[in-house]
Amino acid sequence: MDFSSIVSEDKIKRAYQEGEFNNLPGFGKPLPKDSLAAVPQELRMAYRILKNSGYSIEENELKQELLTIEDLIKACTDKAETAKLQTKYNQKLIQFHQIMKKRTGTSHSKLFGGYQQKVEGKLSR
């Protein structure tokens, strides 16, 4: 251990012995579960950095789902199945644009703007 680690540990031990941590909120309670517990240990720090910088893992997953559904629609020959996939695609697209709107305040899509206003108008009635 280097000098700064030794000094830090000493100060923490002294503060603990003097009871300075007794009045902290959550004292004696278990720590909350890590939301990234399923992510491998070596990737967790990178995920936290991305999340703290405003990049959403959910946003990336939705993009991937949209691309997959687009591929399925292109390959589908059954009209009923295509309609179901198109409905699912529209729902995912709305979710994606809601996430983008929360993050930036706008949806970044001129084509989606008119549709978004109509949907929001119907939902707000």
Image: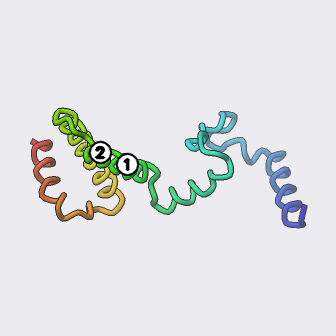
**As drawn, is 122 to the left or to the right of 87?**
left
**As drawn, is 66 to the left or to the right of 15?**
left
**As drawn, is 45 to the left or to the right of 121?**
right
- Distance from label 2 to label 1 (Cα)? 7 Å
Q: Amino acid at mark 2?
A: Lys
Q: Is residue 44 above or below residue 77?
A: below
Please tell me the numbered disc located at residue 98. Answer: none
Q: Quadrant of the C terminus?
A: top left
The foreground one among 79 and 106 is: 79
The foreground one among 89 and 79 is: 79
Residue identified by numbered label 1: 62
The foreground one among 120 and 83 is: 83
Dot 1 alpha-carbon crowd within 10 angstroms: few under 14, some 14 to 19, many 20 or more = some
The spot of residue 96 in percent (x, y) is 31, 51
Q: Is residue 28 above or below residue 4?
A: above
- Picture quadrant where residue 87 is located: top left
User: Answer yes or no: do the residues labelled 2 and 1 have beta carbons within 8 Å?
Assistant: yes
The foreground one among 55 and 124 is: 55
**As drawn, is 99 to the left or to the right of 38?**
left
At numbered mark 2, what does the secondary structure look like: helix, strand or loop? Answer: helix
Q: Amino acid at mark 1?
A: Leu
**Residue depicted at 61% across the width and 42% down the height:** 25
Q: Quadrant of the N terminus?
A: bottom right
At numbered mark 1, what does the secondary structure look like: helix, strand or loop? Answer: helix
Please tell me the numbered disc located at residue 92. Answer: 2
**Residue depicted at 30% across the width and 43% down the height:** 72
- Picture quadrant where residue 21 is located: top right
Q: Earlier in the sequence, mark 2 or mark 1?
A: 1
The spot of residue 6 in percent (x, y) is 89, 60
Dot 2 alpha-carbon crowd within 10 angstroms: few under 14, some 14 to 19, many 20 or more = some
